Image (spheres, helix red, strand yellow):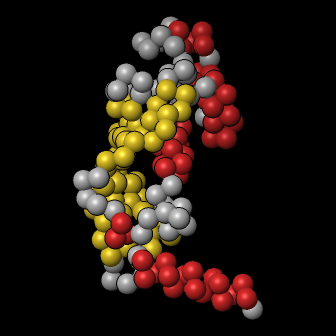
Amino acid sequence: MGKCVEDFTVGEIQESQAKTVTETDVVVYSWISGDFNPMHTDAEYAARSPLGQRIAHGTLGMSIVTGLSARMGDFDGTAIAALGVEDWKFLAPIFIGDTVRLRTTIQDARATSKPDRGVVTRLMELVNQDNTVVQRGVMKTMAYTRAGLETATNTHDSQEKS
């Protein structure tokens, strides 16, 4: 089970497992997104560019952030909704073959006016194998408080017994 709002500590830093960005990741993301920009899909074109090679889509990096965050398990069974992304920056390219990891820092964790839920604000930094932050931004997640999780669990259990 993941954490409730009260379980997060402002200033807490965590790092995820690493993931190597593959050519398959870039090809599949091109098909899903419909973005076939030659910087992602054409090795000859990208070789002549200032970067000298193909790069992953910036939004693929954001998707990897959400996947690495999910693998950390902090919100397993406690998340209610993603509330938004703020100040997202693409700071450096992600190349095919880069190995990235997610570093999260808790900026805020507070209950809302509804006692069953709260909002957790995290600084999300995608870091490559050279310890370069390639993307950074803030994500807010609505999650259960302990009281809210207990109520939700009891309601779910009662419905299953019916």
Q: Nearer the viewer, residue 142 or 83?
A: 142
Left or right: residue 30 compared with residue 114: right
Residue found 42% across the figure and 77% down from its top: 146
**Residue 36 % position (x, y):** 63, 29
**Residue 9 % position (x, y):** 28, 60
- Seen as rendered, the residue at the extreme bottom is 162
Residue 109 visible in this rendered orientation of the protein: yes
90 to 7, vertically: above or below: above
- Seen as rendered, the residue at the extreme left is 11
Residue 34 visible in this rendered orientation of the protein: no
79 to 50, vertically: above or below: below
Left or right: residue 101 compared with residue 23: left
Residue found 30% across the figure and 71% down from its top: 110
Q: How many marks?
A: 0
Left or right: residue 92 compared with residue 69: left
**Residue 161 % position (x, y):** 73, 88
**Residue 30 % position (x, y):** 64, 33
